[in-house]
Amino acid sequence: MASFDIILQALQLVLDPRVLLTAFLAGAFGMFVGAMPGLTATMATALLVPLTFFMDPIPALAAIVAASGMAIFAGDIPGALLRIPGTPASAAYVEDSYKLTMKGRLNEALGTNLLVSCIGGLIGIAVLIVAAPLLAEFALRFTSYEYFWLATLGLSCAIFVASSDALKAGVALLIGLTLATVGLDPTTGVPRFTFGQQNLLAGIEFIPAMIGLFALAEVMRGVIRLNTGTKPAPMPSNTGPLFKGVGGIIRRHPKNIARGSLMGVLIGALPGAGADIAAWMAYAVSKRFSKTPRKYGTGHVEGLVDASAANNAAIGGSWIPALVFGIPGDSVTAIVIGVLYMKGMNPGPMVFIQNPQLIYAVFLIFILTTLMMVPLGWAAVKAAKQVLLVPSRVLLPIVMSLCIVGAFAMTNSVFGIVIMLAIGILGWLLEENGFPVAPIILGLVLGPMFERMFMTSMIKSDGNLLAFFERPIAAGLGVCVLLIWVFSIIGALRQRRATPVGASE
């Protein structure tokens, strides 16, 4: 543990008014970017990098930590208001958030998101401070075999995330995996399913796809209602204090918060995994062990608790390999490592010995910005709630414009808009026929990792499938995946036998 002198030096560095002001302004910027559909925490961080050239190391790190943390939470705001997840992680529980809003429980949804995100973030920081070297060593034991099983475990979540029909969820997942195969083959470099289009060589970006699947489908339904003269369902009142009743939710679900946070830290600490996978897996595990799994996807707050905690806990986890070994845990920490090198703070074991006050200053910045999330988030939600007062005829064109801007921003090309429109129409057709669209996003996010790790493992093992069970961690994960599949099939068969003949028709 650090001596009192080192912690005092770190406190002096962090409590500098310039650092505090930088963290506040960067946090407000991250909150704005994250709340815009299609603009991610990575983009918020990348946009700040040019400004960090002119800053000292601590204010530069404060800006990046504040912006990335706020953007992750802010992705929940458009999800709850418009059913447009701001980040892929928010897509895991967007149905519950939006349906809570439609029931007049917007404050409960976003208040829970905000406070649980803060708690999850603090737990992630605590683990980062106490067990960073230990967890980093564990994470480095992961090879392609372990990552393959982790990706398979994540893909299996589609069955649990699905609201009711596992078969339709499986079909949606296969559509997502098929879309993930478009582009260059990761092993041979040969173009696949590009039909001569150079724009498809890089594959299908999941951010335009996500905007299309969730936002465009909602816009199309709104346009149909307007053209047919059907009055939209009246929006329930969402007034009152933001945090009313949230304390009771937190007291009822302490295990969910602890479980989601620990999953977030562990998955976040794995290089290349990150908050997206953590949120999806936390939501799936929450539904699997819930006493009321049928309420998930209908406006149930329990899944929000697990996934929100995992979301922000993963941020602290992703910094573990970055600080201890200089290995990025996700795209944000990849940018952070570049900034650290630029400022002469070469990440690795030696930085803990040579400049421990700087490392503890980073820890204190994490705590400060996580606590700062509550007032900034409260202000952002208060401002964003005005969206609910806008008439559909005005709101729909605005939402469509945001969709186009978000799709264009990720690809910097009109082709991103084409992808958004095409997949949006596909998503609308699927939803009209009872297929969930969330598993498509899961397939797009995890599909490339699943294929890359499988092919790498097969090449390493010379085609020997038993190699996937030869390493202890890989064997443990593989057995978990197989058990989940076996129990899921047995449960589905029992449910079918228990259903009276003709009841499902």
Image (cartoon, rainbow, N blue to C red):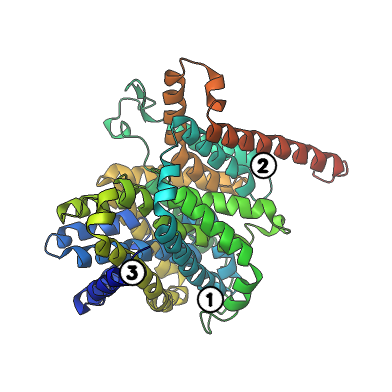
The quadrant in which the N terminus is found is bottom left
Q: Which residue is mark 2?
A: 166
Which residue ends up furthest to the left in the rendered image? 54
Instruction: Return the x and y of residue 196 as percentages of the image width and height.
Output: 30, 25
Which residue ends up furthest to the right in the rendered image? 500
Element under disc 3:
helix
Amino acid type indicated by mark 2: Ala
Amino acid type indicated by mark 3: Leu
Residue closer to the observer: 195 or 182: 182
Side of 367 relative to 152 (left or right): left
Side of 329 relative to 299 (left or right): left
* One can see residue 212 in this view: no
Tell me, for residue 42, which label it has, or none: none
User: How many numbered marks does the figure carry?
Assistant: 3
- CA neighbours of label 1 inside 10 A, class few (<14), some (14 to 19), many (20+): many
Side of 119 relative to 68 (left or right): right
User: In the rendered image of this protein, does residue 254 appear above or below residue 177?
Assistant: below
**First along the sequence among labels 1 and 3:** 1
Instruction: Return the x and y of residue 11 as percentages of the image width and height.
Output: 28, 74
State which mark lies toward you, 1 or 3. 3
**First along the sequence among labels 1 and 2:** 1
Tell me, for residue 107, which label it has, or none: 1
State which mark lies toward you, 2 or 3. 3
Q: Are marks 1 and 2 in contact (CB under 8 Å)?
A: no
Element under disc 1:
helix
